[in-house]
Image (cartoon, helix red, strand yellow):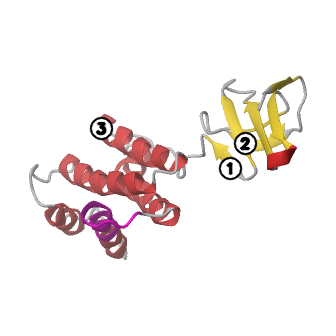
């Protein structure tokens, strides 16, 4: 199979897996083999100029779920990004494990002792008021899925990973981002 440099290929609107922008591009490369019913496109993002491979509904790199969260400590920010990026490359079990580890890091950043059991970190977050009302079920869900990923042969699914990232994002916003948005009191 050969790639053909196409000055203009069928334009495609997509979310760039590198920069996260919604873009449309008609610059790129095309390959195809009618005998194998195969067509692939390599689109060049007009924003960051990096390539995205598209074959049918598959895009590589994929799009990381969730959103950026402001005011995160460096290690927590890196771990949250790692969990999101794991989903973008179809590493769903790795994403679930990163979300589990994220809970531990959040607890320690808020005053829990290092070296405790995972359950102790979950309890610490709940008792110290870092878990929003009705959020305990989600913390337990992260614990449960994380335990499955860590202690069982079972592989995690995209849905598992996206659910945990969505809750992790909310928890991170609740603990780190939203408190920093409150305007300072004036005397």
Residue at left offset 37%, top offset 38%: 78
For mark 2, does the 10 Å Cα neighbourhood hold few (<14), some (14 to 19), or many (20 or more) residues?
Answer: some
Residue at left offset 52%, top offset 45%: 89
Q: Which residue is mark 3?
A: 75
Q: Main secondary structure of the magenta part?
A: helix
Q: SS at mark 1?
A: strand
Q: Is residue 144 magenta?
A: yes
In the figure, 19 relative to 63: above or below?
Answer: above
Q: Which residue is mark 1?
A: 58
In the picture provided, is 45 more to the left or to the right than 130? right
Q: Nearer the viewer, residue 186 or 16?
A: 16
In the picture provided, is 64 more to the left or to the right than 169? right
Mark toward the viewer: 3 or 1? 1
In the picture provided, is 39 more to the left or to the right than 78? right
In the figure, 146 relative to 58: above or below?
Answer: below
Q: Nearer the viewer, residue 179 or 25?
A: 25
Who comes first in sequence, dot 3 or dot 1? 1
Q: Which residue is mark 2?
A: 54
Quadrant of the image occupied by residue 33: top right
Q: Is residue 33 magenta?
A: no
Magenta segment boundaries in residue numbering:
143-155
- Residue 113 coordinates in the image, percent (x, y): 9, 51
- Residue 187 coordinates in the image, percent (x, y): 34, 42
């Amino acid at each position: 199979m050969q790639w053909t440099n196409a000055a203009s290929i069928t334009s495609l609107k997509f979310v760039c897996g590198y920069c996260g922008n919604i873009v449309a591009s008609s610059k790129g490369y095309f390959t195809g083999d009618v005998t194998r019913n195969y067509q692939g496109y390599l689109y060049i993002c007009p924003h960051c100029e990096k390539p995205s491979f598209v074959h049918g509904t598959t895009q590589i790199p994929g799009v990381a779920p969730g959103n950026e969260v402001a005011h995160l400590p460096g290690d927590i920010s890196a771990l949250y990004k790692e969990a999101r990026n794991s989903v973008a490359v179809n590493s769903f079990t790795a994403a679930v494990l990163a979300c589990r580890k994220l809970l531990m890091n959040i607890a320690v950043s808020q005053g829990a002792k290092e070296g405790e059991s995972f359950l102790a970190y979950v309890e610490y977050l709940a008792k110290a008021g870092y878990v929003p009302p009705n959020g305990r079920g989600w913390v337990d869900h992260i614990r449960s899925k994380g335990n499955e990923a860590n202690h069982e042969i079972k592989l995690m699914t995209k849905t598992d990973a996206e659910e945990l990232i969505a809750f992790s994002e909310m928890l991170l916003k609740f603990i780190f981002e939203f408190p920093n948005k409150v305007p300072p009191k004036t005397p």
